[in-house]
Image (spheres, rainbow, N blue to C red):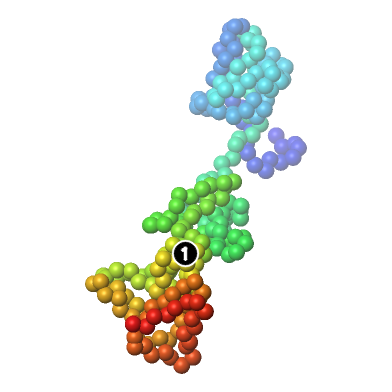
Amino acid sequence: MPYLGRELTSGNYLKLDDITSQFDGSKVTFQLKSGGNDFFPGSSFSLLVSVAGVIQEADSAYQINNNEITFATAPGASDDAFIIVLGLALGIGVPGDGTVGLQHLQDSAKLGISTSNSNNTSTVSVGGGVTSLNFAGPGVTTAFVTNGIATVFVQGGGGSVGAAGTWASDSVGVATSKVVGVGTAQAVGTANSEGALQALGNIAITDGALLIDNDISSSINVPAGKNGLLIGTVNVAVGATIDVATGSVLVVV
């Protein structure tokens, strides 16, 4: 017969195998099959069920559990029945391994890395060959996660948390080209600081001997309340000065 109505564009209608031979007036649960194979409709609303010429109300007159239909009232032993599947689920397919890239994801699904700008707002997406970050080594503190943002503390970042990139090492020990302050809030390179130790210029303690350069290329300031010591003779470079505050003493040995 010619088809009347809107033409099907997807899915398929089919009639399930007859279950009336199992009707005995007391049995309420029956297996659903199509062509002798178990059929899983997925929902009671995907079936059109007729018993004794009456269309049954989905989820009320019957319910679906996997490949079984359970009626609220047992069909009569002589009742006729049919079950029509209103449509079949279509598989959408699963992407193959290694075929989904960042360009297929929403921006909200991408991992952002917070850069170290002053406002802590700049972000870049992991990608382009970088698929993961591994924070390891001395100075790395366990990350703290808040609202989906992981913060990793790395000591030695400059400012108040250390001096990253300042120190170098070799077979002898460690070295730095910067001023070193010990027990002081800042290292300013002059006797003005309150550090227990500061070194500016060529100075070393070797085998108990204090060695200093006999050429002074930077200005020296001995502030009030401080005294200084030089081992001479010394040569003061052009443009460099030695200033001693009133009441302070600079001894040249």
In the figure, residue 213 lies in which quadrant?
Answer: bottom left
Residue at 58%, 9% in the rendered image: 27
- Name the side, left or right, on which 159 lies relative to 175: right
Q: Is residue 181 visible to the viewer in this orientation of the structure?
A: yes
- Name the side, left or right, on which 99 lies relative to 27: left
Name which residue type carries label 1. Answer: Thr
Q: Nearer the viewer, residue 137 or 52?
A: 137
Q: Nearer the viewer, residue 34 or 91?
A: 91
Residue at 59%, 12% in the rendered image: 28
Judging by the rendered image, the residue that carries numbered circle 1 is 184
Q: Quadrant of the C terminus?
A: bottom left
Residue at 56%, 54% in the rendered image: 110
Looking at the image, how many numbered discs can be counted on the residues?
1
Residue furthest left as drawn: 207
Residue at 47%, 64% in the rendered image: 184
**Image x and y of residue 226, in percent:** 46, 73
The secondary element bearing badge 1 is classed as loop
Dot 1, crowdedness within 10 Å: few (<14), some or many (≥20)? some
Q: Is residue 176 above or below residue 131?
A: below
Q: Nearer the viewer, residue 213 or 59?
A: 213
**Image x and y of residue 68, in percent:** 56, 21
**Image x and y of residue 117, in percent:** 58, 64
Q: Is residue 158 visible to the viewer in this orientation of the structure?
A: no
In the figure, residue 133 lies in which quadrant?
Answer: bottom left
**Image x and y of residue 247, in percent:** 50, 77
